[in-house]
Image: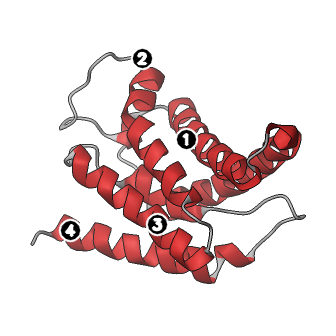
């Protein structure tokens, strides 16, 4: 076993515990609910096998669903953003192909990092709330919950990245 296996395994478990014990019990103004566990999707290296990554993303969402009794919504949303992570990253960096071994997220400009994190966070939250309400007549409520929850989660992700992630510049 290598060091990355233990690092991401530990992160996987800690994020599930934090989400279930802390973040699921927070609701800001009744609209904003942080879903901090998606940090795993952002931190998992793109150099690893995609099939393993998709399986872990599904397992992460399913674990949150199990403890939150949410019927698969988190699994669907987490698997979807894990699947579109690389195409979004390519679109934001304006490259058709890039070398995964040489890629470093910290080398992206702040605007590109901001766009990448916010787009995936917004898409994840939109899927969660659309599946939660499951009717188009609630689209206004879905968009309000998505926007506020995305901003709340995004701020938490920025705080985490500012405090714990190494800068390579």
Mark 1 or 4, nearer chain start: 4
Circle 4 crowding by C-alpha within 10 Å: few under 14, some 14–19, many from 20: few
Can residue 166 be seen by looking at this rendering? no
Q: Within the image, what quadrant is residue 117 found in?
A: top right
Can residue 5 be seen by looking at this rendering? yes
Dot 3: what SS? helix
Q: How many labels sit on residues?
A: 4
Q: Which residue matches tag 2? A: 94
Residue at 58 percent across and 57 percent down: it is: 73
Is residue 39 depicted above or below 23 in this figure?
A: above
Residue 92: image location, x then y, percent: 47, 24
Q: Which residue matches tag 1? A: 120
Left or right, 53 with reference to 163: left
Q: Is mark 3 in CB contact (under 8 Å) with mark 2?
A: no
Is residue 56 depicted above or below 125 in this figure?
A: below
Residue extending farthest left:
1
Residue 114: image location, x then y, percent: 58, 38
Which quadrant holds the C terminus?
top left
Residue at 39 percent across and 54 percent down: it is: 43
Mark 3 or 1, nearer chain start: 3
Dot 1: what SS? helix
Residues at marks 3 and 2, CA–CA distance in whole angstroms:
33 Å
Residues at marks 4 and 3, CA–CA distance in whole angstroms:
20 Å
Left or right, 102 with reference to 154: left
Q: Which residue matches tag 3? A: 62
Q: Please name which of the two marks, 4 or 3, marks the residue nearer to the observer.
A: 3
Q: Which residue matches tag 4? A: 5
């Amino acid at each position: 076993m290598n060091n990355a296996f233990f690092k991401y395994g530990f992160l996987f478990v800690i994020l599930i515990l934090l989400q279930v014990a802390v973040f699921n019990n927070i609701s800001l103004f009744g609209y904003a609910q942080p879903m901090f566990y998606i940090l795993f999707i952002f931190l998992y290296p793109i150099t690893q096998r995609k099939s393993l990554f998709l399986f872990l993303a599904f397992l992460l969402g399913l674990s949150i669903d199990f403890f939150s009794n949410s019927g698969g919504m988190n699994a669907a949303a987490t698997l979807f953003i894990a699947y579109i992570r690389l195409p979004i990253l390519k679109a934001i960096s304006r490259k058709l192909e890039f070398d995964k071994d040489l890629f470093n997220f910290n080398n992206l400009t702040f605007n590109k990092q901001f766009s990448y994190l916010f787009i995936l966070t917004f898409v994840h939250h939109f899927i969660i709330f659309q599946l939660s309400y499951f009717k188009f007549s609630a689209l206004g409520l879905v968009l309000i919950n998505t926007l506020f929850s995305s901003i709340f989660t995004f701020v938490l992700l920025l705080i985490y990245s500012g405090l714990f992630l190494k800068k390579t510049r």
